[in-house]
């Protein structure tokens, strides 16, 4: 591959691009076609090669970001150090997906102490909101499109606080050094990718506020074309301030005031995020949600992410059954689909921010409860309806029927350093380009739309994931790390995660089944067509090779929906011979290692 050479020559290449204005498609020669969706005509996914390394590896959503992370590892940085550098570069080159104006979850495995830590950098609702935030004057829920691109949807960003918290515990290189790759790229510019340009063309300029519109579009409203060298001096200054002063430069002072003013004066619909909300923000450590599946301990993000619990339920509900050795066949695909349906039913009923809601986590993962729920699954026969269960000790009428409208977005970073430490980090500003407004050179999130727009259901029961001041909206982000062995002697096995809104849960589960049950390597597991079921709908990725399977599922009574299911899976497997990395061919990601 050409990436190590590109990394060494990056400053020169970027300088030449700035001078020439020529496209930089050579920088991503090894990347797959970069549309966010599959073409309308069904076609098989273009596969990427499995990447192997001996000592260290980074898998991220853009070559320049992965190169920045590998550069930090080569300088002796930890997986945490590299992850921070990757996130900051992604803020530039993949701005539609993540950045310091949003939130994140992370798991970190420290090999020396054999400890697994979970970090929560999820956004919080402003102190001035109430459960009626997304209701109109008649008490009816607003339409999603009315609030998604507005100040009303913006929560308190958590990425900077979470990165600082992780670095204080596990960082090796100086904090300021981790900002240099992104500062360099922001100053010199980077070539706009085909994926970014096509997304901008699709979105159009009208939903963006003035600063964001000026950055992403020309004076005629045309999206920045592929190869256009995009500079961001405002973001470079923001990064310099945070590099020198730490998170205080973000959560107080001029930048905090600018963020708050941007939200309060949003011309589309003002929001309530204040400078006081920023000053009060706290990233938290959270216990990961872990289950033992076929002698592999799989750990995902804990609440307020629903990812770890829901993936854990899917695995355990499937465990009593033989899933065979070949993927995407029946009955294994139907078994997994019904497990997903049951797990999502529980997710909608019970899961929310556990600082505000008494979530029955222990009951939801109780072996006896899951064993009883698994009896609802019959191989070869579709489960007619997937209703929430009643975990041990739970009042069945305690929570109302969920009304959350979730949309895809996000990015994922997987890293293993030469000391055997691992970072799995899923990071997001929510739907593409977040709230489509900028402060300090970066986009702000629209994560408050991850709350239920309605505070109660038709029976008058309060919905667990309703809006409350200071509350964190339920997330699907699920950074995942898996081990062989036990807590007294764990051995790192897999590091993985994906973007995709609630699809993250389906994508992660598919990949774990592919590697554990179907013995696929990381790249083959990522390449495998995405599938999953929620409610009464079975979603299956477009691929003519799956037409027969789609027909068989339809015959079982599923409503089969063929769609893109654009994941961004990034996986590292630790083997006896070293590291193996898989990057999703549906996006621009790459796996790089030494």
Image: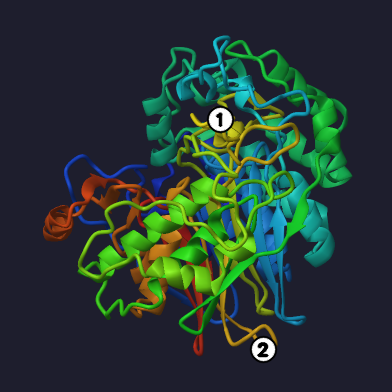
Say which residue label 2 marks: 489
Residue 334 vs residue 72, the one in the foreground: 334
Horizontally, is 90 left or right of 566 in the view? Answer: right
- At label 1, counting other C-alpha atoms closer than 10 Å, the crowd grade (few under 14, some 14-19, many 20 or more) is few
Instruction: In the rendered view, tell whether residue 528 sits above or below residue 488.
Output: above
Q: Give SS at disc 1.
A: loop
Horizontally, is 383 left or right of 162 in the view? Answer: left
Instruction: In the rendered view, tell whether residue 316 sits above or below residue 567.
Output: below
Q: Is residue 73 visible?
A: yes
Of the 4 image quadrants, the one containing the N terminus is: bottom left
Q: Give SS at disc 2.
A: loop
Instruction: In the rendered view, tell whether residue 505 sits above or below residue 221.
Output: below
Residue 487 vs residue 49, the one in the foreground: 487
Q: Is residue 30 visible?
A: no
Residue 474 in which image quadrant: top right
Say which residue label 1 marks: 460
Residue 223 vs residue 490, the one in the foreground: 490
Circles 1 and 2, Cβ within 8 Å, touching? The answer is: no
**Residue 410 image position (x, y, % from top left):** 52, 45
Colour treatment of the image? rainbow
**Residue 372 image position (x, y, % from top left):** 44, 70
State the residue at coordinates (48%, 18%). Answer: 218
Residue 456 in which image quadrant: top right
Horizontally, is 407 left or right of 43 in the view? Answer: right
């Amino acid at each position: 591959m050409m990436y190590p050479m590109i990394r060494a020559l990056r400053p020169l290449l970027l300088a030449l691009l700035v001078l020439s204005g020529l496209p930089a498609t050579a920088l991503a020669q090894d990347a797959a076609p970069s549309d966010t969706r599959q073409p309308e005509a069904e076609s098989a996914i273009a596969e990427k090669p499995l990447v192997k390394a001996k000592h260290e590896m980074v898998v991220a959503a853009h070559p320049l970001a992965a190169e920045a992370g590998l550069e930090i590892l080569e300088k002796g940085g930890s997986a945490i150090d590299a992850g921070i550098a990757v996130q900051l570069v992604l803020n530039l080159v993949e701005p539609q997906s993540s950045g310091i104006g949003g939130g994140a979850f992370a798991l970190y495995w420290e090999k020396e102490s054999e400890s697994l830590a979970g970090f929560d950098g999820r956004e919080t609702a402003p102190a001035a909101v109430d459960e009626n935030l997304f209701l109109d004057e008649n008490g009816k829920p607003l339409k999603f499109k009315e609030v998604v691109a507005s100040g009303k949807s913006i929560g308190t960003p958590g990425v900077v606080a979470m990165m600082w918290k992780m670095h204080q515990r596990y960082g090796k290189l100086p904090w300021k050094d981790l900002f240099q790759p992104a500062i360099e790229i922001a100053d010199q510019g980077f070539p706009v990718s085909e994926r970014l340009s096509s997304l901008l063309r699709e979105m159009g300029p009208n939903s963006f506020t003035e600063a964001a519109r000026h950055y992403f579009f020309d004076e005629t409203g045309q999206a920045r074309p592929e190869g256009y060298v995009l500079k961001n001096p405002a973001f470079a200054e923001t990064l310099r301030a945070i590099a020198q002063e730490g998170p205080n430069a973000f959560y107080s002072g001029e930048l905090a005031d600018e963020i708050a003013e941007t939200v309060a004066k949003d011309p589309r619909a003002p929001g309530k995020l204040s400078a006081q909300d920023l000053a009060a923000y706290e990233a938290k450590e959270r216990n990961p949600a872990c289950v033992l599946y076929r002698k592999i301990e799989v750990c995902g993000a804990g609440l307020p992410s629903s990812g770890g619990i829901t993936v854990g339920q899917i695995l355990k509900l499937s465990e009593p059954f033989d899933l065979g050795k070949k993927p995407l066949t029946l009955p294994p695909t139907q078994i997994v689909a019904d497990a997903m349906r049951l797990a999502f039913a529980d997710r909608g009923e019970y899961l929310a921010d556990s600082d505000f809601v008494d979530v029955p986590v222990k009951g939801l993962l109780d072996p006896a409860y899951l064993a009883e729920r698994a009896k609802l699954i019959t191989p070869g026969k579709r489960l007619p309806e997937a209703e929430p269960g009643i975990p041990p000790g739970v009042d069945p009428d305690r929570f109302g029927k969920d009304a959350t409208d979730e949309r895809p977005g996000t990015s994922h970073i997987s890293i293993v350093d030469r000391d055997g430490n691992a970072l799995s980090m899923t990071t997001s500003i929510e739907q593409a380009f977040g709230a489509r407004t900028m402060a300090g050179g970066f986009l702000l999130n629209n994560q408050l739309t991850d709350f239920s727009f309605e505070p109660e259901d038709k029976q008058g029961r309060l919905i667990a994931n309703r809006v409350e001041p200071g509350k964190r909206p339920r997330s699907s982000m699920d950074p995942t790390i898996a081990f062989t062995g036990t807590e007294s002697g764990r051995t790192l096995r897999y590091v993985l995660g994906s973007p995709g809104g609630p699809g993250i849960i389906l994508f992660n589960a598919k990949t774990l089944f592919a590697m554990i049950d179907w013995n696929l390597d990381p790249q083959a597991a990522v390449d495998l067509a995405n599938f999953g079921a929620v409610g009464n709908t079975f979603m299956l990725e477009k691929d003519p090779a799956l037409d027969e399977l789609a027909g068989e599922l339809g015959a079982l009574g599923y409503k089969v929906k063929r769609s893109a299911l654009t994941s961004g899976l990034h996986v590292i497997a630790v083997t006896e011979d070293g590291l193996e990395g898989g990057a999703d061919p549906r996006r621009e990601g790459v796996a790089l290692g030494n």
